[in-house]
Image (cartoon, rainbow, N blue to C red):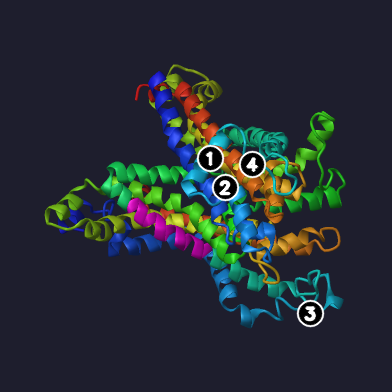
Amino acid sequence: MTRYVARRLLATIPVVLLVTVMVFLLLHITPGDPVVIMLGEEASPDAVTALRHALDLDRPLPVQYGDWLWHAVHGDLGASLRTHDPVTALVLERYPATLELSALAMLLSLCIAIPLGVLSAVRRNSWLDALVTPLAISGISMPSFWLGILLIWVFSVLLPWFPTVGFIPLGVSVAGNLHTLVLPVVTLGVALAAIVMRITRASVLQVLQFDYVRTARAKGVREPVVVLRHALRTALIPVVTVLGLQTGALLGGAVIVETIFALPGVGRLIVDSIFARDFPVVQGAVLILAISFIAVNLAVDLMYARLDPRIRYR
Amino acid sequence: MSAVQRRRDPVGTLTGPASGRGRRRAWRRFWQSRLAVPCAVIVGLAIAAAAGASVLAPSSPVRGELADALQPPSRAHWLGTDDLGRDEVSRLVYGARVSLLAGMISVGLAASVGVPVGLTAGYAGGAVDEAAMRCVDAILAFPALVLALAISAALGPGLVSSMLAIGFVTIPTFARLTRGQVLAVRHLDYVESARAAGAGAPRILAAHVLPNALSPLIVQSSLSVAFAILTEAGLSFLGLGVQPPTPSWGSMLLTGKNYLVTAPWLSLVPGAAIFLTVISFNLLGDALEDALDPRRYVGAAR
């Protein structure tokens, strides 16, 4: 087990390093000289050279990267070009909203998808099963930005049940916070629910064929107990992996959902900063989202080792 | 494919669709699947709209009369007009061009980088494989939409940069898939015998390995086009894709969102177009998978 954990941790290091290289280079593929952009086209060559030197932009790229990484490791991701606030503080301030949105969307999708996935596997070829597959493929193909707009149209414009946009922080009012998050959470959760439903169905179908399940049935264990106690535990292992991998889609989807519903999350910070040409903020926010995604997958892999003893001895 | 192998493999499990007979069977199975026909029709309609936009569109997609702004659907404007009085049907038809171009070109880009990378990594193994796969892992470590967003923002908004960005984030899918296929066949007899006969690596990969990897690549391409269309529309919706006045389904939806109370059709129509096209490509991928996977065929025949 310790060896597995150590190996998994070691394998993460090169990936994290490559991710930092890519995030660092993002700023350098931007067409146009950032110094000229900052000073304007009419700036004298001397002023450009001086500012470039002041910002350390005249040093070789690997040196600049090393310096940037050193600061990043110490939590310093530079300052916003707009507000001059530290990027780390700006991103962390927006982080809780994104975390809450994503976590609730994941919770909602699990609550819908696992029961439906299990039921459609157990009652294979029933009307429910016939309904689940088209539902799943529609959920996967549904553009979240369209679903969000449709939900606003029905539940905010036609029926005034929920606010169109806006956000009440958790600290101000829990009920108000949840009320403002209903439509965004549904918008974000549908695609994940569709994927989890498909995987759960396939996985349960497979596990129900296993010998140990047959043995349990032969011993006279009642069917609900066979499914819920014996089969489900094994069947959920691939579901956990998929959940980890889908965190990326969830964080990406959060960008769109936060923009539609005007939620103060990291995603909207990225979009706003792109339009303000505030690239240090974009860079920092993208890096923090990528690191979060890597951390989730690392956690899933370690959890996997607990759930599935076969992994530990490999 | 050697004659010996074909004899040993009467149902085409090994030859698969790479052989002429397998390909004909696969097509027959494809057209027999219930959803293949309606999906192919929708995709065909979208392609026809994109190709014949200049003939099909009743009026200009970029010019309109302000006096006609936000008209509901009528005989003159079947799907109404937008905030600048432009005909929604014309914009929808021209928007198909952007969506399909973006979908297909970005997947083409991803495949033309990902497939050679996967072939090389899988065949060479060792340090080459390790290095290639770490790079792939690094791209996959980003939430795809966030990375596409960051790249297209860095390159400057526009159709070309969103295609490059979507293509880039799709490379890992093709690289991993191809590598897996290479690993599955590289030690099989026919590859070993080609090597023993003195064939070089490029020839083995092109003539013996790639044809057997084609079926999953075709399936993946269809699914990836669905992802690419969805992502391009998402980038346009955020204002980072195609720039106005060029119509795209994502940017039409962005406009529509502001007139949800007075002109809901502006949101319904482009969203439905995206949804139908994406679901068709996804279902086509599924139908192709069923048709091209010989193991399923064997299972069904029993």
* First of labels 2, 4 by sequence position: 2
Instruction: Please say if B238 is above or below A249.
Output: below
The Cα–Cα distance between marks 4 and 1, rounded to whole angstroms, is 11 Å
Q: Position of residue B248 (x, y in %)?
A: 66, 66
Which numbered circle lies on residue B76? 3
Q: Position of residue A28 (x, y in %)?
A: 54, 54
Residue A39 visible here = yes
User: What secondary structure is found at the residue carrying circle 4?
Assistant: loop
Instruction: Please say if B66 is above or below B3.
Output: below
What is the span of residues highlighted in magenta in the rendered image?
B103-119
Which numbered circle lies on residue A78? 4
Quarter of the figure that contains the C terminus of chain A: top left
Does the magenta run of residues contain B118? yes
Residue sitting at x 56%, y 65%: B160
User: What secondary structure is found at the residue carrying circle 1?
Assistant: helix
* Residue ranking furthest to the front: A46
Which numbered circle lies on residue A56? 2
For the residues labelled 1 and 2, say whether their Cβ atoms are less than 8 Å apart. yes
